[in-house]
Amino acid sequence: MNFVPDIGLLLDGVVAVLLIATIVYCIVLYRQLSRVRNAQQEMHALIASFDHATSRAQAGIGELKRTNDEIVKSLQSEMSKGRILADELAILTESGNRLASRIEGGLTDRPANDVPLRHTPRKPSFGGQEIAKEPDSELKSEAERELLEALRASR
């Protein structure tokens, strides 16, 4: 009978120890939750920074695409102009080659004794000094005249 109050005291002691353990556990849990809240705030700041960097990168990519499109258009235009110039150059080269072949054919196909003699006029002089004539005024073969016309036309 005396034994019963001792059990009550013992139960009170066990409850007190459990309450102290609960309080210590709550303090530890509170500190961990504080660390999680601080980490959460840092995470929010990091996410905001990442979002800002992502939007800047997207804007940069858009600008790069626009610049790329402009460069492509410019290069295509320049390539088109280059092709046109190359075609014109090919036509001029072919025309020059045909003219050179005609001139060469005119010079090599003619027999040596068939070459017409040129009249070499005396150079006019005035007061003992020679007066130069224009090159066009001298007699020229048909091939020479064609060559001169082609050269004048190409200028």
Image: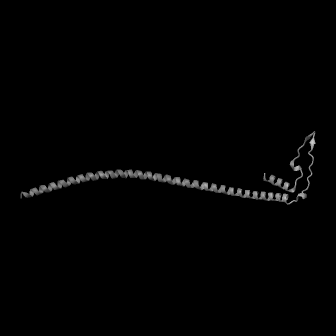
Residue 123, picture quadrant: top right
Front residue of 34/108: it is 108
Residue 131, picture quadrant: top right
- Give the quadrant of the N terminus: bottom left
**On the rendered structure, is 27 left or right of 5?**
right
**On the rendered structure, is 109 left or right of 67?**
right
**On the rendered structure, is 54 left or right of 2?**
right
Q: Position of residue 102 (x, y in %)?
A: 82, 59
Q: Position of residue 135 (x, y in %)?
A: 86, 48
The residue positioned 53% from the left and 54% from the top of the image is 61
The residue positioned 48% from the left and 53% from the top of the image is 55
Q: Say how many tags the image has.
A: 0
The figure's colour scheme reads: one colour
**On the rendered structure, is 155 left or right of 126?**
left
The residue positioned 43% from the left and 52% from the top of the image is 48
Q: Residue furthest top?
A: 127
Q: Position of residue 18 (x, y in %)?
A: 19, 55
Q: Residue furthest left?
A: 1
Front residue of 53/126: it is 126
Q: Position of residue 68 (x, y in %)?
A: 58, 55
The residue positioned 84% from the left and 59% from the top of the image is 108
